[in-house]
Image (tube, rainbow, N blue to C red):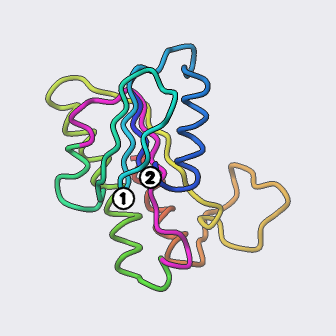
Amino acid sequence: MHILIIGAAGMVGRKLTSALVAAGQIGGEPIGRLTLADVIAPTAPTGFTGKAEAVASDLSAPGAAAALIASRPDLIFHLAAIVSGEAEADFEKGYRINLDGTRYLLEAIRQEGMRERYVPKLVFTSSIAVFGAPYPEVIEDTFFSTPLTSYGTQKAICELLLND
């Protein structure tokens, strides 16, 4: 199995990479290849016996998503984001990274699938910020999405794009 982790240099990306390398498999399938991508080249994992590639790539740059998808990964973890504080401080950057980067990724997958059937599994990390406060103790599936920040709005739009 070929796994692509976008946002692999971040805290969650590093922990996910370590967990996958330690397990050596996911869903009963051995991991033969890892592609780790982020705006700065992630550190290649130690102890991984398969092929590992670390790539510096800005998902919001034209063509970057298509280049990552060209290798047709079986499983994609999309962890890349500008978090709330930075997304609020730099409105344009928040939308460029959080929304445009995700949109380009989804479009690259769609375009690759139009050439020859390609339907990878995609894990998208959203945020509790899509709901807006106040939060109940348990957020049920029927709880309304009413973001109060640009970051929450960006993540909510990406969720809608995934649903589409």
Q: Position of residue 142 (x, y in %)?
A: 69, 52
In the image, taking residue 87 as reference, residue 119 lies left or right, namely left
Question: Looking at the picture, does residue 46 appear above or below residue 57?
Answer: above
Of all residues shown, which one is farthest toward the right?
Answer: 137
The quarter of the picture where the N terminus appears is top left
Query: Which of the 4 quarters of the picture holds residue 143?
Result: bottom right
**Nearer to us: label 1 or label 2:** 1
In the image, taking residue 59 as reference, residue 11 lies left or right, namely right
Residue density around tag 2, few if under 14, some if 14–19, many if 20 or more, within 10 Å: many
Q: Position of residue 108 (x, y in %)?
A: 24, 44
In the rendered structure, which segment of residues is drawn in magenta?
68-86
Question: Mark 1: which secondary structure?
Answer: loop
Please tell me which residue is depicted at 49% across the width and 15% down the height of the picture: 30
Instruction: Report the residue marked by disc 1.
Output: 40
Please tell me which residue is depicted at 41% across the width and 21% down the height of the picture: 50
Question: Looking at the picture, does residue 123 appear above or below residue 52?
Answer: below
Please tell me which residue is depicted at 62% across the width and 67% down the height of the picture: 129
Name the one closer to the observer, 139 or 32. 32
Residue 7 numbered tag:
2
Name the one closer to the observer, 40 or 153. 40
Q: Position of residue 32 (x, y in %)?
A: 41, 20
Query: Which of the 4 quarters of the picture holds residue 70?
Result: top left
Amino acid of disc 1? Ile
Amino acid of disc 2? Gly
Q: Position of residue 60 (x, y in %)?
A: 28, 61
- First in sequence: mark 1 or mark 2? 2
Name the one closer to the observer, 61 or 31. 31
In the image, taking residue 83 as reference, residue 131 lies left or right, namely right
Of all residues shown, which one is farthest toward the bottom?
Answer: 89
Query: Which of the 4 quarters of the picture holds residue 24?
Result: top right
